[in-house]
Amino acid sequence: MTPTEAAFLDAVTMDEPWALIESFATFKREHPTDVNRGMDEVVSRLTKHGVPVTVHTPSLYLSLPGLARVEVGGKVMRAKPPAYSADARGGITGKLVYIGANAIDDIDDMFDRRFDSSGAAAERARGNIVISDGFASPVMVQQFQEMGAIAVIAINPGVDIHWGICTTIWGVPDLDDLPRKPTIPALAVNQPDGKALQEIANKGGEVTIFTEMEEGWFTSKLPEVFIPGTEEPEKYVLLHGHLDSWDVGVGDNAVGDAAMLEMARVLWANRDKLKRSVRICWWPGHSTGRYAGSTWFADRFAIDLEENCVAQVNCDSPGCRWATEFNNLSRMTETDTLISEVIQEVAGKVAQGERPHRAGDYSFNNIGISSYFMLSSTMSDSLREEKGYYGVGGCGANIAWHTENDTLEIADRDILFRDIKVYLLAILRTANATVLPFDWRATAREFQGTIAGYQAKAGDRFDLTPSKTAANDLLAALDSFHAGVESGTVSAAQANTVIQDLARILVPINFCREARFRHDPAVTIPALPTIAVASELDLHADTLGFAQNHLMRGQNRLVSALKQAVRHIQLVTA
């Protein structure tokens, strides 16, 4: 760690961030009125420290859940509707049908659980209320809606009921997205009530469900801090996190809001030591608009982001109780060395990185921006097992996530102090590196592994040799590029142009199905998605020819992108 880096980290204190957490623990931040109140407090605290703030006021289309319940046999069961459920305050009565779900293995399964979609299951679902296990996720609601269900009940895995959102639309819908907007009501119940309802379903019983929703356009505040660098002020790292929460949402995400507040204070006070700029944003509409705030920003500033953003860093749920480890840490492969070294230096921990999920305000993949962090530190697997905790999507793995229990005791002052330093050092090294600290050779090797895995599953039904060759050529070109950087024949300025341009090409081809500047649905995107069907040919026995044609087009897109990346490199190294 350099003396400059140490000075930045030594400047971190817990006075301001902890005061914000204590304040946020006293009021809910679900409705835009309350979210704006929270934004005003962030702005006030920044202004007190002399940090200039720009407050944007986007109009966002949001869905605000109200009350919900299930009535059966004279009994009323407590429930919560997810955002974007259809309104059913007048009640919907129907036969209750249980349809099973797959087991949960990881966070992707938690949100993208697959359900029995056989013809028999579809026949049972049609015209009835379907109940199944899991969270009231986009995939659950979409699948049962397509099967003809009139409503959906999700059985949450514990005694508490979790809030959520059930639309696959990422951000505010456009005209192409609108057909995917849910048209049926959905709600969640806890496990004890869910099991009782499952017994009713097994007996062919009926239930009545009620959901109260408020949906429409809301003016939302979005604070932005821009801390200019001294050498390349137009280039910047984007640090961001959401301010809206379910209930008081301390672990998700008052702790992240506080962390960004402190980093803004420290970075502004020491801005004369920054080479590149740092841009910091607090998002509205994360929970009630499927990342509506970050998506608005990505759309509104798309060209500037494309030209100048060198990395995006998401700050969600740092500093939570018992979160001693850095497991399942979201990062794009090219950033792995950077964040692994930072976490080892600051926390003395080994980071276990993984492919970023289609979640967490990662609204910039379509632009093509290298990214690291989403959820932050977490408790150990052994502690989760000891406590009997099921998987959740935040709060450092505390199952208070998205419930009324996410209160002040979920935050840990000492762990947050450490996590702020982890974030701050990673951002500093990105902003101040002579050559951007992203190694695309690691990503090229990832591509080689992905292609080999897909080929093994496809067998002789499709030949991915062109993809394999293009990935090999990319790695060879990158080896030459890095040799040039190390020898000095490639200047730092040239290297940084190439590294940023590679992100614009390689991030979208690895994380997006949609064209650039459009937003993929909020469902899991497999690695190199244009050729991912190669791993699923066993499912296409009756449609093999169509699948092969799909793969031909997808391979063309992938090979073209990899060749374009090689040309960018060769412009410098040739």
Image: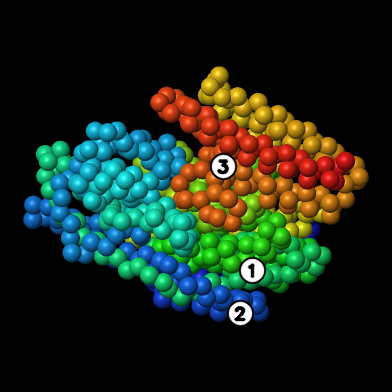
Does residue 76 appear in the picture of this structure? yes
| Circle 1 residue | 264
Q: 522 or 260: nearer the eye?
A: 522
Q: Residue at x 45, y 60 (%)?
A: 175
Classify 10 Å Cα crowding around label 3: few (below 14), some (14-19), many (20 and above).
some
Specify the quadrant that holds the C terminus.
top right
Task: Point out residue 303 in the picture as x, y percentages from the top left corner.
Answer: 66, 62
Above or below 219: residue 479: above
Q: Secondary structure at mark 1?
A: helix
Type of the residue with mark 3: Arg
Q: Which residue is mark 3?
A: 355
Q: Which mark is residue 47?
A: 2
Q: Quadrant of residue 258?
A: bottom right
First along the sequence among labels 1 and 2: 2
Which of marks 1 and 3 precedes in the sequence? 1
Judge whether residue 190 can be spotted in this image: no
Mark 2, Cα crowd under 10 Å, few <14 / some 14-19 / many 20+, is: few
> Is label 2 in a helix, a strand or a loop?
helix
Depth check, front residue: 48 or 241: 241
